[in-house]
Image: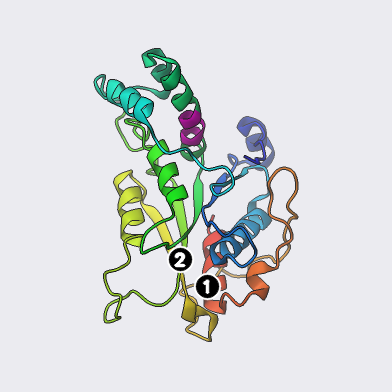
Amino acid sequence: MRAVTPPDEHDMTKVTGVAVTSLLHLDSSANRSDESVTRQLTRLFAETWQCLYGQAGYRYRDLAVEPAPPIDTAYCALGRRSERYGVVPLAKVDALIDNQAEETTWALTRPLIDELVSSQTVLIGAPMYNYTLPAALKAWIDRVSFPGALVDPSSRTRVLRNTKVVIVTSRGGAYGPGTPREGWDYETPYLREYFTKHGVRDLHVITRRADLGQPGPAPRGPARAGGTVPRRSPRRGRGGSPRRGQGARRAGVGAAARAEVEAAGASG
């Protein structure tokens, strides 16, 4: 994974007066080219976010390039063992490991959980494939859903309750009420239910349909109260920062979709 290591939070607080703002950016489209609509829009979100908050708290994971392995027998065995003890702190799961296979599967799982729970904003690019979410994204969800991992062991509260989640979806055609495909969208309801179940209260789903490339209604709100979103964008470097992107602006993804993504990015 390409990542930018955040500076010490205490040091940043002394300089800025606030804790480091962090963004975990996940792409899951199998199409890794600039033609991918979700990649264009998540890149635009990340660029907008970094213009406002800087690059220090930004982390990127491409689930198509470095997929989370599907869960296996060892994952299930370790998970069941953990459940017998109630909510086990992540640091103590190591003590429950019984064999090499379990050690390997936990080594693949723990970093993904740590990335998720330490992020204030989670951005997910999730195109619809065959009426549901990409397998790469589902594999990541299965990994981070290790029993008890998303529950605070001391307070028993959901650790994602203060996390903002932004999901950018794309699909061809419409699936809303009155359309021929009404009820065929098994992706958006699933993602809403999953994150809501795990305590997320600030959840945004941005849908890019095929017809959003045409003139349409204005976005639902201003990108930033009293002003506009900065247009300057950092380049993508070795640390995984988005390059000075033009993909979403030149590929006809639609003014309404662009404005909604920028508005969500501006709200952090």
Magenta stretch bounds: 108-114
Left or right: where 26 falls relative to 182 = right
Label the magenta part by its dominant secondary structure.
Answer: helix
Looking at the rendering, which quadrant does residue 134 occupy? bottom left
Assess whether residue 111 is covered by the magenta stretch.
yes
Query: Which residue lies at the image location 30% right of the left edge and 25% below the top edge?
Result: 87
Q: Give the mark nearer the N terminus: 1 vs 2.
A: 2
Nearer to us in this view, 178 or 115: 178
Q: Quadrant of the C terminus?
A: bottom right
Query: Which residue lies at the image location 66% right of the left edge and 73% below the top edge?
Result: 249
Q: Residues within 10 Å of mark 1 (few under 14, many from 20)?
A: many
Position of residue 255 relative to residue 38, above or below, is below
Kindly identify the amino acid type of the residue bearing the numbered disc 1. Answer: Ala
Mark 1 secondary-structure assignment: helix
Q: Quickly name the residue at label 2.
A: 206
Q: CA distance from mark 1 to mark 2?
A: 8 Å
Q: Quickly name the residue at label 1.
A: 257
Query: Which residue lies at the image location 67% right of the left edge and 42% below the top edge?
Result: 56
